[in-house]
Image (cartoon, grey):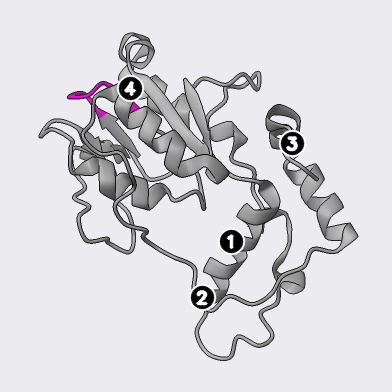
Amino acid sequence: MIISHKHKFIFVKTRKTAGTSIEVTLSKYCGPSDVVTEIAPREKGHTARNFWIDKARGVKFYNHMPATEIRALIGDQTWNSYFKFCVERHPYLKTISLFHMHRHNQSGDKSQYTFENWLRPDNAPSDFFMYADERDKLIVDRVIRYKDLERGFAEVCEQLGLPCREIEARAKADSEKVPVELTAPQRAFLDEQFAKEFAHFNFAR
């Protein structure tokens, strides 16, 4: 997550949407007082800074922080005057990508680590709350579609007056991918899990 006071923008980082790659690219243009949150594992070109608010109380800006929490910490005046954006992805593809990441992080024999065994509610969480309020109203200024990421990112950079027009590196790329073909029950499960995304963005089913 990034709060750039220099360029007056806030990047709300959702999951499995090239968020780390976007952070690496944008952090290079952030000023010394801008907030860039920690990521793990560390990525070359990414320098976290100014994320602590109160160490004694353990209050800080953090990776994948919901927009409502960011707004509460920086105040309505700053929030309303900055450009807020994030990226969202088709729920089916997002969930499959998350599975590949989890599978990649497993040690030992992965042959029994299948999508069917892995898929459950806590492994397919909706990110809608990260850029919407309690009434399910979007509170960011733009949600870039992942399928249009390159064009959308270039348009945002141009709007903000940033010299970058493309995402310079792809971090945390999925590896060791195994074929995943969703069954009808799995699609129905994801349709329910991501009902708000399907309703708002009209994703194909």
Q: Earlier in the sequence, mark 2 or mark 4?
A: 2
- The alpha-carbon separation of the residues under discs 3 and 2 comes to 28 Å
Is residue 205 located in the magenta-colored stretch of the structure? no
- The alpha-carbon separation of the residues under discs 4 and 1 comes to 30 Å
In screen coordinates, is 106 left or right of 70? right
Q: Amino acid at mark 2?
A: His
Q: Amino acid at mark 4?
A: Gln
Quadrant in the picture for the C terminus: top right
- The alpha-carbon separation of the residues under discs 2 and 4 comes to 37 Å
Q: Which residues are magenta?
A: 4-10
Residue 123 image-quadrant placement: bottom right
Q: Position of residue 91 (x, y in %)?
A: 67, 48
Viewer can see residue 65? no
Residue in the picture at 53% in, 90% down = 108
Q: Position of residue 157 (x, y in %)?
A: 31, 31
Mark 4 surroundings within 10 Å by alpha-carbon count, few (fewer than 14), some (14 through 19), many (20 or more) = few
Camera-side residue of 43 and 164:
164
Q: Which residue is mark 3?
A: 198
Q: Which residue is mark 1?
A: 97
Q: Which residue is mark 4?
A: 159
- The alpha-carbon separation of the residues under discs 4 and 3 comes to 28 Å
Camera-side residue of 111 and 22:
22
